[in-house]
Image (tube, grey):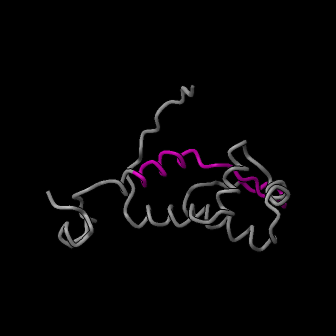
Amino acid sequence: MSTSTPVEPIDVELTRAAAIFAALAEPVRLEILAVLAGGGRCVCDIQAAVPIAANLLSYHLRVLREAELIEGARRGRWIDYRVAATAEPVVAGALALAGRRGGPHESALPTADRGVPSS
């Protein structure tokens, strides 16, 4: 039985939530996050674990950085990456935003037109 502590979501804006979901929607990026979940890694170690072309790896790392899901620190010619400390609460906040009802992002369509049964 898991005894992990619950994550307190961070409030995120709709556009930021969309960027987070877009970053997580690519299987290669999820694979990169899985590699980094074991701890910080040099880009060369990520390349070995996720065998894609260097330019594609660079692109996917940039998308994850821009979504603030990972952080990088330069070490000479190499960059060490790690999962950002705020990644888990930010993702939780994006999920909370996606699950909210009645907020400013709510569809203007009546409930029946959105396929939701009326009471």
Please provide percent x and percent y for residue 66.
Answer: 57, 64
**How far across and down, in percent of the image, does residue 40 sit?**
73, 46
Q: Is residue 89 magenta?
A: yes
User: Which quadrant of the figure contains the C terminus?
Assistant: bottom left
Above or below for 84 versus 105: above
Residue 39 placed where, x, y %? Answer: 72, 42
User: Which residue is located at x 82 percent, y 63 percent?
Assistant: 51
**Percent x, y for residue 12?**
39, 56
Name the residue nearer the viewer: 15 or 72. Answer: 15
Question: Viewed as shown, does residue 115 lie left or right of 5?
Answer: left
As for residue 85 lying within the magenta part, the answer is yes
| Residue 35 horizontal side relative to residue 10, left or right | right
Placement of the N terminus among the 4 image quadrants: top right
Q: Residue 64 is drawn in which quadrant? A: bottom right
Q: Residue at x 41, y 67 (%)?
A: 15
Q: How many marks?
A: 0
Identity of the residue drawn at 58% across and 55% down: 69
Who's the residue at 75% across and 56% down the image?
A: 74
Which contiguous range is marked in magenta? 73-95
